[in-house]
Image (spheres, rainbow, N blue to C red):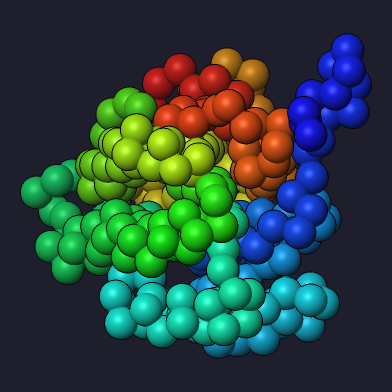
Amino acid sequence: MDPIGQHGKGLDFSCRGQRALVTGAASGIGRVIAEALLDAQAQVYVCDVSAEALAECEQALPGVRTARADVSDAGQVDAMFARIAEDFGGLDILVNNAGVTGPVGPIEDNDPAQWERNMQVNVNGMFYCTRRAVPMLKQAGGGAIVNTSSVAGRMGYPGRAGYAASKWGVVGLTRSLSAELGPHNIRVNAVLPGTVEGERHERLYAERAKRQNMTFQEAEALYTTQVALRRFVTPRDIAAAVVFLCSPAARNISGQALGVCGDVQYMR
């Protein structure tokens, strides 16, 4: 069925019956993405490193399935996909959302261990999950992969070089996989959030305020002036973009790095 419908009516933004995995999704942005996919009538598997957060997620979201896994560990990822194959019998959607912030500050002060962890989760984790998901998507006759990058994946980010490097890597992986997997009817896109309301970015404001000898409010205002719309995005904004990219309405969208940022003009 044409998802557009006659005269543009009846747009299909649902994910009805689709089997989805969202990584790093027991809390934060990933949790909201999982909720949105459930609302779009998908079956959803959630993975996270926190057993406590997963237990709370199971209680709050009836019907969701969970697996404790660190995506930077290939063995744990393999075990998770074995469970998904047993429980779901396959996969139609992969949302590679798990990520860490990485080291903050001048490059000469970056802790090598934090740098390595940043790359292991943000880049290696996507590889480990994608390599296991692709055979399932091919078997299903196609599907969608959405990778969480960042506005830092399209511009420089002083004081956050490791994070930016990893998120540029996500965009490169996305565009390469789109070309590779397109013939198998697998669409691959990335979403690039800007400054997102919530505790994670509040910690960044506090860190910047401390480094630059300013108040928390001054640091927050500094981030706001970098955005054309002069406001931050919400997790729901990001989730809406992910559901759209997974839905039949986006059936011809692939290889794109979609900014969900209010048009960030620069980063400092």
Quadrant (top left, top right, bottom left, bottom right) of the N terminus: top right
Q: Provide residue 77's location: percent of width, then percent of height.
A: 38, 76
When the figure is inspected, residue 147 is found, relative to residue 265, above or below; the finding is below
Q: Image point 41% across, 57% down: which residue?
A: 134
* Drawn side of residue 217 relative to residue 222, left or right: right
Q: Image point 66% across, 54% down: which residue?
A: 33
Note whether residue 118 is visible. Answer: no
Q: Image point 56% across, 57% down: which residue?
A: 140
* Drawn side of residue 155 relative to residue 7, left or right: left
Q: Provide residue 258's location: percent of width, then percent of height.
A: 52, 29
Q: Provide residue 84's location: percent of width, then percent of height.
A: 55, 77
Kindly indicate the quadrant of the structure image that contains residue 100.
bottom left
Note whether residue 56 is visible. Answer: yes
Kindly indicate the quadrant of the structure image that contains residue 129.
bottom left
When the figure is inspected, residue 233 is found, relative to residue 36, above or below; the finding is above
* Drawn side of residue 114 relative to residue 32, left or right: left
Q: Provide residue 35's location: percent of width, then percent of height.
A: 75, 60
> Which residue lies most toward the top here?
7
Kindly indicate the quadrant of the structure image that contains residue 234.
top right
Quadrant (top left, top right, bottom left, bottom right) of the C terminus: top left
Q: Nearer the viewer, residue 224 or 86?
A: 86
Q: Nearer the viewer, residue 234 or 212?
A: 234
Q: Nearer the viewer, residue 173 or 217?
A: 173
Q: Nearer the viewer, residue 43 or 60?
A: 43
* Drawn side of residue 154 relative to residue 18, left or right: left
Q: Image point 79% across, 24% down: which residue?
A: 4
